């Protein structure tokens, strides 16, 4: 298992590598596919965790938070498919089941015993912040490795994540 600059471990998530006419070295493709599969797992996990918050939030701010959490989840959902298909476009194997995501995601599990609006919002903010920072790092890594298309996809996702993080975090400020 390799190590990133920040000390976090990087799993090998390349899976079966297929032939492709994409003009990119096999080594770079393998690295980018692995990066995509890590972000695929994170995105899938973040989506389900945000839905978990949407379903279970309680308290006087129920309506507002219930709607906000759904909006956040829906904003990130299309990228599950787009990230998976970037992995396959590079000749890789998308590792996209719920079980695969659970094994691979960098996010901690959502607590099952949190219901009150403010506490739940804080957990959601924590998860989205971790997610946004991870995809930002992945965008930089893809850029530095020379895969601008993968980097561009991660940048787009990161912009959405930052915006939704702001929507959630603003409730806890001022
Ligand atoms: Fe719903």
Image (cartoon, rainbow, N blue to C red):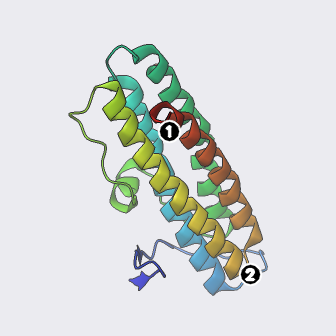
Residue 157's spot in the image, x, y percent? 64, 51
Give residue 5's position: percent from left, percent from top: 48, 82
In the image shown, does 86 or 106 lie closer to the viewer?
106
- Position of residue 37 measured from the top left corner of the image (x, y, whole percent): 51, 63
The crowding category of the residue bearing disc 2, from other C-alpha atoms within 10 Å (few below 14, some 14 to 19, many at least 20), is few
As drawn, is 106 to the left or to the right of 173? Answer: left
The residue sitting at 54% across, 54% down in the picture is 132
In the rendered view, tell whether residue 97 sits above or below residue 87: above
- Depth check: give the residue in front, 131 or 116: 116
Asked if 145 appears above or below 54 in the picture, the reply is below
Q: Is residue 54 above or below residue 6?
A: above
Residue 77 visible in this rendered orientation of the protein: no
Circle 1 is placed at which residue position? Answer: 169
Name the quadrant of the N terminus.
Answer: bottom left
Say what secondary structure mark 2 lies in.
Answer: loop
- The answer to whether residue 131 is visible is yes
Q: Nearer the viewer, residue 17 or 83?
A: 83
The quarter of the displayed image where residue 114 is located: top left
> Residue at the front extreme?
174
Q: Look at mark 2 in the image and give the residue it sits on.
A: 24
Q: Residue at x 70, y 66 (%)?
A: 151
Q: Look at 32% across and 17% down and name the residue there.
A: 59
SS assignment at label 1: helix
> Seen from this angle, which residue lies furthest left?
113
Residue at 30 percent across and 48 percent down: it is 109
């Amino acid at each position: 298992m390799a190590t990133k600059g920040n000390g976090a471990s990087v799993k090998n998530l390349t899976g079966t590598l297929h032939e492709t006419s994409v003009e990119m070295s096999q080594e770079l493709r393998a690295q980018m596919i692995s990066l995509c599969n890590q972000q695929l797992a994170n995105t899938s996990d973040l989506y389900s965790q945000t839905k978990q918050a949407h379903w279970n939030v309680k308290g006087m701010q129920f309506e507002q938070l219930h709607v906000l959490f759904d909006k956040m989840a829906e904003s990130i959902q299309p990228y599950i498919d787009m990230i998976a298909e970037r992995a396959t476009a590079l000749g890789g194997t998308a590792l996209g089941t719920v079980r695969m995501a659970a094994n691979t995601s960098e996010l901690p599990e959502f607590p099952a015993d949190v219901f009150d609006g403010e506490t739940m919002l804080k957990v959601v903010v924590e998860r989205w912040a971790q997610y946004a920072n991870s995809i930002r790092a992945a965008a930089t890594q893809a850029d530095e490795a020379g895969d601008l298309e993968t980097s561009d996809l991660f940048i787009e996702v990161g912009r959405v994540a930052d915006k939704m993080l702001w929507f959630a975090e603003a409730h806890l400020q001022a």
